[in-house]
Amino acid sequence: MPGKAGMMLTFQRFCVYPQNTHTIRLPLAASYSSSLPMASEAIKGAKVLMVGAGGIGCELLKTLALSGFRDIHIIDMDTIEVSNLNRQFLFRQSHVGQSKAKVARDAVLKFRPHINIQPYHANVKDPEFNVDFFKQFNVVLNGLDNLDARRHVNRLCLAADVPLVESGTTGFLGQVTVHVKGKTECYECQPKPAPKTYPVCTITSTPSKFVHCIVWAKDLLFAKLFGDKNQDNDLNVRSSDAASSSENVEDVFVRRNDEDIEQYGKKIFDHVFGYNIELALSNEETWKNRNRPKPIYSKDILSDELAQPNGNVDKKCAFDDEFSVSAMKSLGMKNPQDIWSLKENSRIFLEALRLFFTHRGKDVGNLTFDKDDQLAVEFVTAAANIRAASFGIPPYSLFEAKGIAGNIVHAVATTNAVIAGLIVIETIKVLQNDIKSYRMTYCLEHPSRKMLLMPVEPFEPNKSCYVCSETPLSLEINTKRAKLKDFVEKIVKAKLGMNLPLIMNSSNLLYEAGDVEDDMVAIYSANLEKVLAELPSPVTGGTMLTVEDMQQEFVCNVNIKHREEFDEEKEPDSMVLSGWTQHVSAPENKDKPAANNGASTSGASVPAVESDEISIVSPTKKRKLTNVPNAPGNEARNHQDELQVIDDEDDLVMLEGNMEGFKKRKLS
Amino acid sequence: MDGDGEELTAQETALYDRQIRVWGADAQRRLSKAHVLVYGMKGTIAEFCKNIVLAGVGSLTLIDDRIASEEAFSSNFLIPLDENVYGGKTLAQLCCDSLKDFNPMVRVSVQKGDLSSFDVEFFNNFDVVVVSSCSLPAKKLANEKCRKISKRVAFYTVDCRDSCGEIFVDLQDYKYSKKKLEETIECHLRYPSFEEALSVPWRELPRKTSKLYFAMRVIEKFEEAEGRSAGEVSVADLPGVLKLKKELCTEQSLNESHVPDTLLERLVTSTLEFPPVCAIIGGILGQEVIKAISGKGDPLKNFFFFDAFDGKGIIENISNSNA
């Protein structure tokens, strides 16, 4: 008997598994009655792909197995870390360092030995996971932690015409959404809140929040001292004094071979916290309406310690190995939740810097910030705190600073478990093609109209979604100044989310990523460096470029409009893309992607933020799946910022949509 | 921070990093000192136990003397399928072995005996008591015993049938504080006992009160009247259940449409738990217990219902002050 939701769940008789006599006859958890094919049949015969074996993945794999699923494939490129163990319960301390996909599989087979779980310790963006690979599945379930991978999977699911159940959690919040090509929105139909990025000048000259200091400490100072020397770096403040030679200033950061490390440390300290601030202060304009920062010099803070070298070079603190090298340990500071004084921060700064050179010298010059690198976190925390002190911003503890610098997502097991249950429920509906019953479900921290779990009907595809419908895009750009590589990096990869793009001007191939024939490699490299108007097939105003990602089977047309001038502050990339839904914009603070050695937790092409974009997003327009006849008065209502929940009495319960996460589409 | 052993160890800080970022180090410390008692090791309780062991409670005591059987395996991922391993052991023993594995810092142990046989002093050993697979009289009795203890013992019941689930919360007299913007607000909630909640006349409850509340009460009463243990019903009992429903609705002056026959049919026909619902209810329950122990966050008052049919997770306040 179908209700509005159209589901009837009754339990089937026990289903006998083949093979040996020790096998338990397990009841198949749920089945649908009469009119629809048995859900148990659908579950039994289903081939499911899970992407992600982390927080959601562990819970999901367990629940799928218990629910009677017998053929599950799971992709995850990560290895297990200690901080996973508070919620990824299929893993143990002894598994640290091993593949998540493989260990998850082994753990689940312990209580469901006769099902098939195929693990892939690989990046879902690898070419082996092409459309044909995706086509073999009845449904794809995402348990990812980054937007980039989600978009990629979304496109593959659209290309393969396989339903996708998406999900995410952050702390106590979570959501599950269903995406079926042609029937519902795709994952990219609705704008997702873009992660925060900061204007360069805020970071280099006028920080007002602690996070600005963190970004400075991590992406500028840390990178300058310990990272690749050949990288551009905005560390040095532009001063009003045009005569100051930047060459002289560059020398400061280079440590001469015989230079005493203590001296070097203090020199750096005084340069970035003292001299640079004085330089910035000399530009009166900047400070007209702002509080002036105070220069800080090491001799003023650590005056009583000048007699004794910092950290006692002779009596060194012993460390077990290079991984346990720590300034806090060296200085006897135990609690990461403590808020350090300016003096303590300065000590940590100098000691951490010293330890990098004395104990991890071979790393200097190739380091990128890693939140699991204790010494790096100590350095960045101290540096950020000192800068904060300079600018009158309150300091943070190491624990908090690490969270900010590492974009750590706070996470607990319970939310993941709830979301996993909701995912399986939607999956069963999808396998039954029970379109009317699909729901987007939000798990709230505070109840909304008595609900902690709030289901909402999915929406029709967005007709102007450039991913699942065919909307042309336009790009304003200076075709006489911008190079092809700028277009590829900032638009095609960063904004359009393509992984291995192909760029064509009519029938002329301008660039192709990935495997190319030898004779083309040089041509494409050369093209990247050329200005658009000077390409072999010139790109000027009126040109229509075709960009394509073969793996994602995603094609886009971009109309080029030439424009001479751009606003430095508002349009720092000197490019304006219209007709697309805003997603992640490439962070202006040059975050270098972490090296992808299979063991890192972030993929090579993942943008800075790995946190889940979880705000409860509600659309401004309602395009419900089921047709609700609109009374004349309802027309206007449908376009307001509201959510509708259909309850089983045909009452429409109107809720106030949470508009926090929704940003109106901007053209720039 | 004081250095008198109250601080979290380095091991705890590393392990609990992600959740400390959710609820703070203080809450984590309180969790590590909490003692939890659990009765009835079915799927939902298994989920709940997993959650609080991972969260890092001080200790977890399990009661379930039933010998492992086929039914037990359906939704319980804590039990290995190897007969050589599970043969002859009680559910509590099997779950205990698995749970210890999840977090070596939590003391997991087994307590033998029937719930009704424990006295007030026994319950005094715990900060939190969670009962499931429990008849109505046994639930009430356990709740009353917990309420007799001067230190506050948080009491919960949980019941999952078909694709539905119910949680009941009794925090007695509960005071906590929370931050709103820059202010600290003091909150005070008064919870009714299970018996008190059930005594609220049905007609005095809000019109949109979850139908599952009434349905569960009908089935509970049926099981009690027939001398059945919890969950010991089948589709053959449906006529009896529907008859009882009619009687109760008349007695309570409640329109029968508030307790749909279809819902009752579902609940008596499939008494097995549905794994996704176990995960959901076990998760919500886990969160609630963590809130009560840590004193952080608004606890739900006092019933929670979930039905996979409509996908809503609803809080209902069934108490006299509300009516």
Image: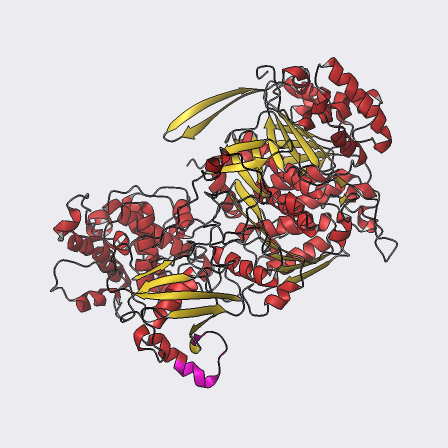
- Please state the horizontal and vertical placement of residue B226, each as a whole percent of the image: 85, 22
Q: Quadrant of the rendered structure where residue B215 is?
A: top right
- Location of the N terminus of chain A by quadrant is top right
Q: Quadrant of the C terminus of chain A?
A: bottom left
Q: How many marks?
A: 0
Which of A188 and A560 lies nearest the eye of the viewer?
Answer: A560
The chosen color scheme is secondary structure
Relative to B311, say whether B177 is above or below.
above
Tell me which corner region of the image, top left, top right, bottom left or bottom right, holds residue B51: top right
Seen from this angle, which residue lies furthest right?
A21
Q: Nearer the viewer, residue A592 or A580?
A: A580
Residue A171 percent coordinates (x, y):
51, 42
Please, is residue A524 above or below residue B315 in the view?
A: below
The image position of residue B110, as x and y in percent, is 73, 36
Q: Is residue A528 magenta?
A: no
The residues colored magenta run A511-523
Q: Is residue B58 visible?
A: no
Where does the image place residue A291, in percent across and percent down from the top left? Answer: 19, 43
Is B109 on the left or on the right of A25, as rendered? left
Q: Nearer the viewer, residue A397 or A434?
A: A434
